[in-house]
Image (cartoon, rainbow, N blue to C red):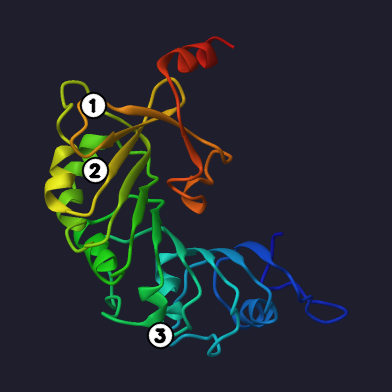
Amino acid sequence: MSFRPSLQFTQGIPSGLRHITISSPDLDHTLVCFLEAQPQLESLWLDCPSLHRKSPFSASPWPKLKFLTIDYSALPHFFHLPASVTHLAVLDIPEHTHPRPPKQTSFLENIRVLSCHSSFNSRVLMELVASLPNLEWIEIRESRPYLCIVEQGLFSALEPAPKLRGIRFAHQVVPPHHGLLWEVYFNIVESLQFVEFYEDLGGFQRWYRHSVEPVPVRWRCLAGNEWLSDWVEDVDQIVREELLLDGLF
């Protein structure tokens, strides 16, 4: 559904919604009241910058919230909430951030999946990753070429992720003549199992630790929902012949 802060409800604010997508110019009082009236909320896409210094939300309005997509400026308003969110997607990561994410809250400790939807400063991303001690999966969902992302310091940004198991580049293809470039990730993060890249034929390929060639994979979910899925169980390994046939039809 869409929502405008100026919208007036003639019969009270609707409640009981489980999935909400909102784009708004500001996180105003009407919007906060509407969101807090949804105790059954499971997924929230909140494309809305915030200028509030303190969180406008009460202590625990969404005990069932698992999937959160949010503008980086509004993310601090969720740090004090109880642990429930496991999948976090961040929009519009700034070049400079203030304040920094706190070192330890139950909300941040519960995050297992992080998806980055914009270009980023490596220091800002490092601060965010460092605040997620149990992070297992990270998705880079921006449009810049892979080498541009690397030059921004992605390697160092992922160092503070001791439990990271998988890195996924949703739009980046392995650059020509850079076949061993991803091995740097395995050297930096001991727990890392694979690095996944987009493939020109429409699929994806995973480079596993100590592998000599990539493994083509196909996600069982809709495109764009990979970060919400199980990164192990919801992926099928495929043979090259299947990829070629898919490209023909």
Tell me the quadrant of the picture where the C terminus can be found.
top right
Q: Which of marks 1 and 3 is in front?
A: 1
Residue at the extreme right:
11
Q: Name the residue under label 3.
A: 53
Q: Are marks 2 and 1 in contact (CB under 8 Å)?
A: no
Q: Which amino acid is tagged 2?
A: Ile
In the image, residue 92 lies at what x, y percent?
40, 58
Q: Which amino acid is tagged 3?
A: Arg
Q: Name the residue under label 1.
A: 175
Q: Which mark is residue 61?
A: none
| Residue 3 placement: quadrant | bottom right
Q: Which mark sits nearer the N-terminus, 2 or 3?
A: 3
For marks 2 and 3, give the CA distance: 31 Å
Q: Which mark sits nearer the N-terminus, 1 or 3?
A: 3
For marks 1 and 3, give the CA distance: 42 Å
Q: Is residue 86 left or right of residue 125?
A: right
Q: How many labels does the image show?
A: 3
Residue located 29% across and 78% down the image: 99
Numbered disc 2: secondary structure = helix
Q: Which amino acid is tagged 1?
A: Pro
Q: Which of marks 2 and 1 is in front?
A: 1
In the image, residue 242 lies at what x, y percent?
49, 16
Q: Residues within 10 Å of mark 2 (few under 14, many from 20)?
A: some
Q: How crowded is mark 3: few (under 14 residues within 10 Å), some or many (20 or more)?
A: few
| Residue 147 placement: quadrant | top left
Q: Which mark sits nearer the N-terminus, 2 or 1?
A: 2
Residue located 57% across and 41% down the image: 221
Q: Nearer the viewer, mark 2 or mark 3?
A: 2
> Front-most of 144 and 161?
161
Residue located 73% across and 69% down the image: 17
